[in-house]
Image (tube, rainbow, N blue to C red):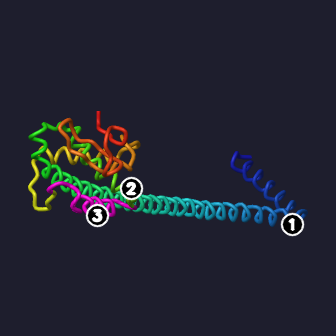
């Protein structure tokens, strides 16, 4: 018997046994096929679910990124609006300060003859302006615009010597007036209380009085 014939017999015997097993256990091939089908279906479902999961994750990331971008844009818009409002308030306040300073410089121009005669120092000029500030504070103000109007009314009310809206004040008086107004706006404590609303120009300097008819040093104040 040749080797080929031997192999053919072996295959034939194995085939016979397979047929015998199928006859004896007919459900085995069916079960095997179901198992294979189940595995294939499970793999297919897993692949589909994997794809869906990736899509959901990407969508969630995109939505999160959009939400973050929207939130940041909203926060930036709010911050920009607040910054613009603060800038507008600061610009308005600066405009008020400059207008007040110009009025104060005109008031200083009105006493230039006293300055030249008695050689008033900057402290005397500041004291002179302080009387006007105290009068405005005593009147009470609610905002910068109200303060500017009240200061203008006080200075132009005939109580400050030779104040003239058409005066062209000196540069040095403009600078001093601007410094005085800024200090007035920013001060936490005042050098003298608001009752000292009257200025008296004397040879030894500018004095403030809490009564127009005050005399002596009891009810008068002067910057040291």
Q: Is 109 left or right of 207, judged from the image as shown?
A: left
Q: Could you tell which of marks 3 and 2 lies nearer the N-terminus? A: 2
When asked about the image quadrant of residue 175, the answer is top left
Measured in 3D between alpha carbons, the distance from the residue under mark 3 to the one under mark 2, in whole angstroms, is 14 Å
Location of the C terminus by quadrant is top left
> Closest to the observer: 126 or 23?
126
Image spot of residue 211 (x, y percent): 34, 50
Label 1 SS:
loop
Which residue is found at the position 42% from the left and 61% from the top? Answer: 78
> Closest to the observer: 83 or 206?
206
215 to 28, vertically: above or below: above
Farthest residue toward the right? 24
Is 159 colored magenta in this rendering?
yes
Q: Could you tell which of marks 2 and 1 lies nearer the N-terminus? A: 1
Image spot of residue 103 (x, y percent): 20, 56
Measured in 3D between alpha carbons, the distance from the residue under mark 3 to the one under mark 1, in whole angstroms, is 110 Å
Image spot of residue 59 (x, y percent): 53, 63
Residue under label 1, please give it. 26
The nearer-to-camera label among 2 and 1 is 2
Image spot of residue 164 (x, y percent): 13, 60
Pointer 1 local density, CA inside 10 Å: few below 14, some 14–19, many at least 20:
few
Q: Could you tell which of marks 3 and 1 lies nearer the N-terminus? A: 1
Residue under label 3, please give it. 149
> Closest to the observer: 181 or 8?
181
Q: Is 20 left or right of 148, judged from the image as shown?
A: right
> Which disc, if any, is residue 138?
2
State which region is magenta: 142-162
Is 152 colored magenta in this rendering?
yes
Measured in 3D between alpha carbons, the distance from the residue under mark 2 to the one under mark 1, in whole angstroms, is 113 Å
Q: Is 61 left or right of 81, judged from the image as shown?
A: right
């Amino acid at each position: 018997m040749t080797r080929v014939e031997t192999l053919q017999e072996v295959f034939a015997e194995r085939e016979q046994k397979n047929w015998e097993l199928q006859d004896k256990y007919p459900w085995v091939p069916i079960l095997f096929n179901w198992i294979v089908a189940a595995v294939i279906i499970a793999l297919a479902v897993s692949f589909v679910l994997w794809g869906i999961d990736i899509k959901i994750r990407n969508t969630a990331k995109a939505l999160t990124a959009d939400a973050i971008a929207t939130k940041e844009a909203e926060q930036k818009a709010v911050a920009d609006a607040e910054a613009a409002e603060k800038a507008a308030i600061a610009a308005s306040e600066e405009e008020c300060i400059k207008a007040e300073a110009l009025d104060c410089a005109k008031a200083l121009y009105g006493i230039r003859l006293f300055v030249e005669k008695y050689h008033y120092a900057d402290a005397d000029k500041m004291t002179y302006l302080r009387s006007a500030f105290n009068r405005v504070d005593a009147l009470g103000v609610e905002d910068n615009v109200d303060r500017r109007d009240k200061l203008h009314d006080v200075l132009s009310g005939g109580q400050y010597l030779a104040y003239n809206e058409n005066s062209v004040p000196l540069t040095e008086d403009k600078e001093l007036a601007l410094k005085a107004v800024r200090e007035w706006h920013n001060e936490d404590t005042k050098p003298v209380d608001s009752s000292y609303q009257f200025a008296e120009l004397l040879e030894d300097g500018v004095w403030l009085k809490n009564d127009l008819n005050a005399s002596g040093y009891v009810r008068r104040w002067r910057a040291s």
